[in-house]
């Protein structure tokens, strides 16, 4: 399988990199696999008996904004402090080696691809980004950079004042992320990224495409489905799915049962 993966990488004229939360695991970030995975990363929510879906809702920004920003402020700090692992650089090296084009499609909100030097114009963040903010009341359509600093009491997972505020109406604002039961997410930034990606696909439809999927789980299968759709719709596209616990994809696509760094290094070694 690794030999086949290496030959697909060798032949690729286009790389489409699709990534879920597991992509961050080798950088030391938690994925949110099941309630227990989430509670292991955030023991405070275990004590409070709250699941990921119960924490990640816009309701808290209205009812208890210190609690809401406890979760999102902590994650903002964590993602800012994280150094993207070697795997990000291995794929960039392949792009350069083949003189290829690329695009990233991710459900991660953590901004790790930008941090690893990927071009902001070639990234689609399907669930938005924690590094951008919007009004929780949708008093306007603005989406602006998250340049706030956060102090979090990690025992209670509550943020201290001052909390970030809407640049127009002054109410506590929220990250520009699609949450659960979320009717207020402003999609404009993601829609523009989607549009750029559609255009990219049209331009590259006849070329050899390697879809490298990493860390995309089955629970919210947005990214897995996106990879599979590209694999089905484009004649010269092959998906390489890298996932240690939830591998599996039908032929001619390839599945590697390993972590992202381990899988990418193994392919790289064969090139
Ligand atoms: N970093 C982030 O931005 C972040 C983190 C957690 C959750 N989320 C959000 O929560 C949702 C979670 O869905 P999901 O499918 O992305 O994550 P998930 O937590 O449901 O699944 C993670 C997947 O990564 C795999 N994995 C574990 N370790 C890995 C490794 N070392 N290398 C490669 N893969 C590994 C697991 O087997 C699993 O299939 C998404 O919608 C996302 O927006 C984002
Ligand atoms: Zn406002």
Image: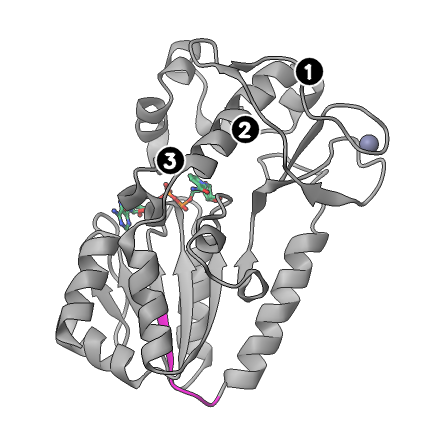
Query: Which type of secondary structure does the marked residue at label 3 adopt?
Result: loop
Taking the image as shown, residue 159 lies to the left or right of residue 212, namely: right
Q: Which mark is residue 224?
A: none
Q: Between residue 75 and residue 35, name the one nearer to us.
A: 75
Residue 15, compared with residue 62, is above or below; it is below
Is residue 142 left or right of 27 when viewed as pictured? right
Tell me where the magenta segment starts and ends, as one range: 206-211
User: Which quadrant holds the N terminus?
Assistant: bottom left
Q: Which residue is mark 3?
A: 32
Determine the residue located farthest toward the bottom in the rendered image.
Answer: 206
Residue 209 magenta-highlighted: yes
User: Would the CB of label 3 be found within 8 Å of ligand 1?
Assistant: yes
Residue 224 seen in render: no
Q: Earlier in the sequence, mark 2 or mark 1?
A: 1
Residue 72 is marked as 2
Q: Residue at x 45, y 28 (%)?
A: 52
Work out whether 4 lies above or below 133: below
Residue 63 image position (x, y, % from top left): 68, 15
What kind of element bears circle 1? helix
Reply above or below: 226 against 219.
below
Question: Which residue bears the numbered disc 1?
Answer: 63
């Amino acid at each position: 399988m690794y030999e086949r993966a290496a030959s697909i990488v060798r032949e690729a004229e286009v790389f489409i990199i699709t990534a879920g939360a597991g992509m961050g695991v080798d950088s030391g970030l938690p994925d949110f696999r099941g309630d227990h995975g989430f509670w292991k990363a955030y023991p405070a929510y275990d004590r409070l008996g709250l699941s990921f879906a119960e924490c990640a809702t816009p309701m808290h920004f209205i009812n208890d904004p210190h609690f809401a920003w406890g979760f999102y402020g902590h994650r903002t700090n964590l993602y800012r402090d994280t150094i993207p692992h070697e795997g990000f650089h291995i794929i960039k090296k392949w792009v350069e080696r083949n003189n290829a084009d690329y695009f990233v499609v991710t459900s991660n909100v953590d901004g790790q691809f930008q941090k690893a030097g990927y071009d902001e114009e070639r990234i689609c963040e399907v669930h938005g980004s924690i590094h951008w903010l919007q009004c929780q009341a949708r008093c306007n359509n603005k989406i602006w950079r998250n340049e706030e600093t956060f102090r979090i009491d990690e025992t209670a997972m509550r943020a201290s004042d001052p909390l970030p505020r809407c640049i127009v109406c002054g109410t506590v604002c929220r990250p520009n992320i699609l949450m659960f039961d979320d009717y207020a997410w402003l999609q404009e930034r993601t829609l523009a990224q989607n549009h750029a990606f559609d255009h990219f696909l049209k331009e590259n439809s006849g070329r050899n495409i390697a879809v490298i999927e990493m860390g995309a789980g089955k629970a919210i299968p947005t990214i897995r489905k996106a990879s599979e759709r590209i694999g089905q719709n484009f004649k010269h596209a092959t998906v390489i799915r890298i996932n240690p616990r939830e591998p599996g994809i039908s032929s001619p696509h390839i599945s590697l049962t390993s972590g992202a760094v381990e899988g990418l290094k193994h392919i790289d070694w064969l090139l």
